[in-house]
Image (tube, helix red, strand yellow):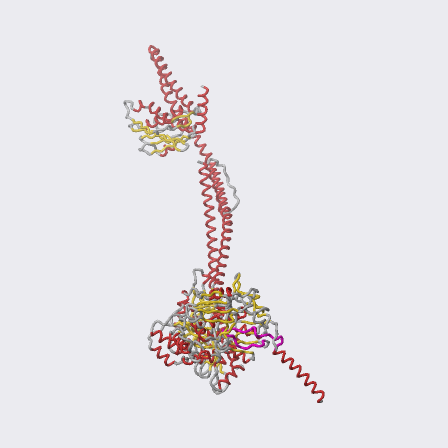
């Protein structure tokens, strides 16, 4: 019995070891099917809907790592002249666009000039020079933004140097990407990626459950259900700001009081706990606490008493219209809750689906892990003045953010994470994005076997 | 004249037939119209009654449908309350503070599964655990929930929504877990989709008015297709129901087209507290009724029209059948008037018209017999008159002849010495009287042998002037009262085809006749004129005039009212005029003069022939 059982034990151990190694060993080939809500109208990297997959097609000069530090990409090194207005970059050699043509300094300069009309960008011997009108100490992180991707535009088509090349593009519907064998950073594991665009959360979940797709976005409510149904759900750190933005600046002290009352009336804790299913954080500031460490200093607690007092000091208050994206179920519930909360403070709001309203509910992804760039991009997206950073210190950053909040134009509500559901066949999914919130799909592969 | 008379009779016959035709047709029209009106009236009453009954039935059917929907909602809510999910939720709630996040979308999912528009899970205090219609309302109290006991059946409830208020047909049920059982409140929203889902009979539509505020707001009156565009006609009815909160019914005229009329029955919908929450309006189209009525009307019209045509044809036939004997009689009468007294009418029936025809035939026979008798009498009278005139005329010369012969005989016997002288004188007298006899005989002979007129173009004005000139001396002869002769002649010649000699003689006789009638003087007026195809001559005097009897006999030969004269003058005038195709008449009144009127045909054909002959003669000469 012992004699026969030992060989069997060895054999079975070998088989299990082989199987285990087969599960973890990278595998080339296969197609990853992805579904997204975004429905971009072009493949321009500046398009909001292209952000998620821009890094698959295009490269930037510099990338930002998980710690918000700039890392080389198409530029291997860079140096600023004193005053941080003139920067010199050395380009990586041997890089080609997906059409096979080599990357040149002139091509990079042309691409950056299109993305930034006010910049002076030109080629220099063996490198690239960028001159700004004002000191730009955070230019490397800014160059890592998707909109600064290096793009060659020919015959109305965009060509990048990224790991994938566009093989099929159906406007706002479908994008098929094929792996580049000659990518300068090595061939991706996947042969291709098929992205279905404009898919609702519900349709995405159905597609995942039916095995038609392997990577989807999910809403917070769905995340809870997905967890119950044992789907692989992963989420990022809170990387999106949900806020209320007034269309007009506050003109008078009474208007500011009303806006203060409005901000105090909102039960962010309940919104986060119920609507976001506890997945995010109540927001008092624009940048999340995990990025700045000081966000807790901005009040986010509901104080109905103070809200009512502030409201009572203003004899007359107009009915505000509250705009939101009617196609976003999360926004709809949040907007309805905000109306209820404000009503308790004596403020009357009327829901007005769409963008034309006195107050708009917006969701803005954080553009960068670099806090200065992230705050600047947020301010630009919210229509707020560009923040002024006196120095690189955290105090100045706080001061700049506080100035934005004191404008009474924006009421932060929540910082919410990005959440995805992944099929069991997807391997090496790290659940993280790069420093600009982009997927790192070139690092994953697809297993032919179901888990 | 005969032709004109014929046309006149024909027109009268036609008029009679037309009268019959119009009369018959009118009677038939009245009958058809009366029948159509009676049928239409009866049909309208019957349809009105049927329509009312149908409306009542429809409203009752709608109520059943509405109640059935309520029961359906109650069953669905009961199913939710009895479900495993509800039980688990109730158990979780009984253990402490509810996890609103866990149920945020559950009400929506369950509502979708159960096909409910509104669904709320509430704790025993009425706090919303999960809401399908307003997910963000978790943690808030539903203030409109009925307090106390749970209503056993469906009820109406006004539901607060993020974008306003809506009315729901709701049911509430307990989840029987624990001491403080949670509640399930489910509703079907009463909106256009709800109205569209109701099974209502054809021709019926359901409208709904949500009673959000006092007064009428047109934009919240809807039917199955959405807001109603035109609400003015229905507004008073809704206001009435709002005030009285009682059912009402009214015929609504949406437009001038009666087919678009609707009988609207209103059903007030109160909530549990009795407050009027909405009004259901069941519209019953009157289109089928109006179309049926129009169909009957058009059928009656066409039937009436066809009846009228048939009636007209039959009336024409009947009128012709009735008037044909009359026409025959009229034709026969015209024949008789034309002198054909032998005319007889065919007697084909024995009715009144047959008797009339028989009487007509009898009359013509009698007329013929009377005429024969009259002719014989006139002949006898004429011969007697002729004998009297001859005796009278001959007696005058014979008496001197007799006296002269007797003088001769007496002179031969008593005074032979003067016989020779007396013989000479007597012979002279005898010859004179014999000459008178011959003259008398000659005049009679002349009358019997009146010459035929020799037609030529004659200007009557010229003839008149010659006659006046001829008698000018006699009119003013000494020893007699003066007579004025006045001519009233047109400037243009009045030409006829006639014999100038005979016409001159006729006019002379008339002037002589007038002079004889004016022994105390007076005025003779002679007028000529041309009218149509005739020329007219009038000779008037201001003499003693004639009696009507004299007027009748004045043209009779040998008749005279004078102490002297043969009585042939006016007879000759009539003979001349008659030979010219004309006619003469007399108009007189005793003491006021006499007027002779002559109508002469122009005889244009003869004039033209005369002209042709004249021109040909001229050409030859």
Compared to residue B26, the image places residue B185 above or below, namely below
Q: Nearer the viewer, residue B29 or A169?
A: A169
Q: Evaluate whether residue B155 shows in this view.
A: yes
Q: Nearer the viewer, residue A412 or B319?
A: A412
Please state if B15 lies on the left or on the right of A18 as rendered.
Answer: left
Query: In the picture, which quadrant includes the N terminus of chain A?
Result: bottom right
Q: Nearer the viewer, residue B132 or A198?
A: A198
Span shown in magenta: A426-451
Q: Evaluate whether residue B151 shows in this view.
A: no
Count the labels in the image. Answer: 0
Dominant secondary-structure state across the stretch colored magenta: loop
Name of the residue lying farthest toward the bottom: A2
Image position, residue A372 (x, y; %):
44, 74
Image position, residue A254 (x, y; %):
34, 74
Name of the residue lying farthest toward the top: B417
Image position, residue A366 (x, y; %):
47, 74
Please state if B578 lies on the left or on the right of B483 as rendered.
Answer: right
Compared to residue B48, the image places residue A395 above or below, namely below
Q: Residue at x 65, y 80 (%)?
A: A18
Query: In the picture, which quadrant includes the C terminus of chain A?
Result: bottom right
Q: Quarter of the image holding residue A402?
A: bottom left
Residue B273 counted in the magenta span:
no
Residue A431 counted in the magenta span:
yes
Q: Nearer the viewer, residue B90 or A32?
A: A32
Image position, residue B546 (x, y; %):
34, 32
Name of the residue lying farthest toward the front: A125
């Amino acid at each position: 019995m012992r004699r026969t059982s030992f060989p069997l034990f060895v054999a079975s151990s070998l088989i299990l070891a082989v199987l285990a190694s087969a599960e973890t060993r990278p595998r080339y080939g296969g197609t990853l099917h992805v579904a997204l809500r975004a429905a971009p109208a072009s493949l321009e990297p500046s398009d909001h809907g292209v952000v998620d997959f821009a890094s698959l097609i295009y490269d930037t000069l510099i990338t930002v790592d998980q710690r918000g530090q700039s890392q080389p990409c198409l530029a291997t090194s860079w140096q600023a002249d004193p005053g941080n207005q003139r920067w010199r970059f050395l380009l990586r050699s041997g890089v080609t666009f997906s059409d096979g043509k080599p990357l040149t300094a002139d091509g990079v300069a042309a691409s950056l000039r299109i993305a930034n009309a006010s910049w002076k960008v030109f080629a220099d011997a063996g490198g690239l020079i960028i001159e700004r009108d004002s000191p730009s100490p955070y230019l490397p992180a800014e160059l890592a933004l998707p909109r600064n991707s290096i793009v060659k535009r020919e015959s109305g088509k965009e060509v990048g140097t990224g790991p994938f090349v566009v093989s099929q593009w159906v406007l706002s519907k479908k994008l098929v990407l094929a792996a580049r064998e000659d990518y300068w950073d090595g061939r991706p594991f996947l042969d291709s990626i098929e992205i279905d665009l404009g898919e609702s959360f519900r349709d995405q979940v159905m597609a995942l459950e039916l095995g038609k797709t392997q990577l989807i976005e999910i809403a917070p409510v769905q995340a809870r259900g997905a967890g119950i149904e044992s789907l692989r759900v992963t989420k990022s750190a809170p990387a999106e700001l949900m806020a209320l933005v007034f269309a007009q600046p506050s003109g008078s002290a009474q208007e500011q009081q009303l806006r203060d009352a409005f901000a105090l009336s909102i039960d962010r804790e309940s919104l986060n706990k119920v609507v976001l299913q506890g997945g995010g954080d109540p927001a008092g500031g624009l940048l999340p606490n995990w990025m700045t460490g000081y966000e807790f200093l901005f009040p986010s607690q509901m104080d109905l008493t103070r809200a009512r007092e502030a409201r009572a000091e203003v004899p007359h208050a107009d009915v505000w219209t509250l705009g939101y994206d009617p196609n976003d179920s999360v926004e709809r519930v949040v907007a309805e809750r905000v109306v209820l909360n404000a009503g308790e403070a004596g403020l009357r709001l009327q829901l007005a689906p769409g963008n034309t309203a006195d107050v708009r509910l917006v969701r803005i992804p954080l553009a960068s892990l670099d806090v200065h760039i992230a705050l600047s991009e947020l301010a630009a997206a919210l229509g707020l003045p560009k923040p002024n950073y006196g120095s690189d210190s955290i105090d100045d950053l706080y001061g700049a953010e506080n100035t934005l909040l004191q404008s009474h134009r924006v009421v932060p509500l929540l910082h919410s994470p990005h959440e995805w559901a992944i099929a069991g066949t997807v391997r090496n999914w790290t659940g993280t994005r790069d420093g600009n919130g982009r997927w790192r799909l070139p690092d994953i592969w697809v297993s032919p076997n179901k888990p | 004249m005969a032709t004109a008379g014929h046309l006149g009779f024909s027109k009268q016959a036609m008029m009679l037939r037309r009268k019959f035709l119009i009369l018959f047709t009118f009677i038939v029209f009245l009958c058809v119209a009366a029948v159509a009106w009676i049928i239409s009236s009866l049909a309208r009453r019957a349809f009105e009654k049927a329509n009312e009954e149908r409306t009542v039935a429809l409203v009752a059917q709608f109520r059943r449908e509405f109640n059935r929907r309520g029961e359906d909602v109650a069953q669905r809510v009961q199913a939710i309350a009895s479900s495993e999910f509800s039980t688990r939720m109730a158990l979780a709630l009984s253990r402490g503070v509810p996890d609103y996040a866990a149920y945020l979308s559950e009400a929506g999912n369950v509502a979708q599964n159960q096909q409910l528009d509104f669904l709320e899970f509430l704790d025993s205090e009425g706090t919303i655990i999960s809401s399908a219609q307003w997910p963000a309302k978790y943690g808030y109290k539903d203030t409109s929930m009925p307090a106390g006991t749970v209503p056993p059946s469906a009820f109406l409830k006004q539901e607060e929504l993020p974008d306003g208020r809506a009315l729901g047909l709701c049911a509430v049920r307990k989840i029987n877990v624990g001491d403080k059982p949670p509640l399930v409140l489910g509703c079907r929203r009463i909106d256009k989709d709800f109205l569209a889902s109701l099974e209502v009979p054809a021709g019926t539509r359901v409208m709904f008015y949500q009673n959000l505020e006092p007064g009428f707001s047109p934009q919240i009156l809807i039917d199955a297709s959405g807001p109603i565009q035109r609400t003015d006609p229905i507004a008073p009815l809704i206001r009435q129901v709002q005030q009285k909160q009682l059912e009402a019914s009214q015929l609504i005229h949406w437009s001038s087209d009666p087919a678009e009329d609707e009988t609207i029955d209103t059903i007030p919908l109160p909530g549990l507290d009795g407050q009027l929450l909405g009004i259901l309006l069941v519209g019953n189209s009157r289109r089928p009724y109006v179309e049926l009525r129009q169909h009957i009307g058009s059928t009656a019209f066409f039937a009436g029209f066809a009846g009228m045509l048939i009636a007209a044809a039959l009336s024409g036939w009947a009128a012709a059948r009735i008037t044909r004997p009359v026409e025959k009689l009229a034709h026969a009468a015209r024949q008789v008037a034309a002198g054909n007294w032998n005319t007889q009418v065919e007697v084909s029936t024995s009715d009144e018209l047959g008797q009339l025809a028989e009487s007509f035939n009898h009359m013509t026979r009698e007329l013929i017999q009377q005429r024969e008798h009259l002719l014989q009498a006139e002949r006898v009278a004429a011969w007697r008159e002729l004998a009297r005139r001859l005796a009278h005329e001959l007696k005058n010369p014979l008496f001197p002849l007799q006296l002269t012969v007797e003088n001769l005989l007496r002179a031969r016997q008593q005074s032979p010495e003067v016989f020779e002288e007396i013989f000479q004188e007597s012979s002279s007298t005898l010859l004179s009287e014999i000459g008178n006899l011959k003259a008398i005989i000659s005049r009679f002979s002349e009358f019997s042998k009146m010459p035929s007129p020799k037609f030529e173009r004659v200007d009557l004005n010229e003839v008149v002037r010659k006659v006046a000139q001829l008698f000018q001396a006699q009119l003013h002869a000494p020893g007699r009262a003066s007579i004025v002769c006045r001519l009233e002649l047109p400037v243009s010649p009045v030409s006829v085809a006639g014999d100038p000699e005979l016409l001159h003689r006729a006019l002379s006789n008339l002037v002589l006749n007038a002079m004889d009638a004016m022994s105390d003087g007076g005025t003779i007026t002679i007028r000529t004129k041309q009218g149509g195809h005739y020329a007219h001559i009038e000779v008037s005097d201001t003499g003693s005039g004639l009696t009507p009897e004299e007027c009748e006999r004045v043209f009779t030969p040998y008749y005279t009212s004078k102490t002297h004269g043969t009585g042939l003058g006016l007879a000759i005038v009539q003979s001349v005029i008659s030979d010219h195709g004309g006619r003469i008449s007399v108009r007189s009144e005793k003491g006021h003069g006499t007027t002779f009127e002559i109508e002469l045909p122009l005889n244009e054909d003869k004039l033209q022939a005369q002209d042709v002959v004249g021109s040909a003669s001229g050409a030859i000469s």
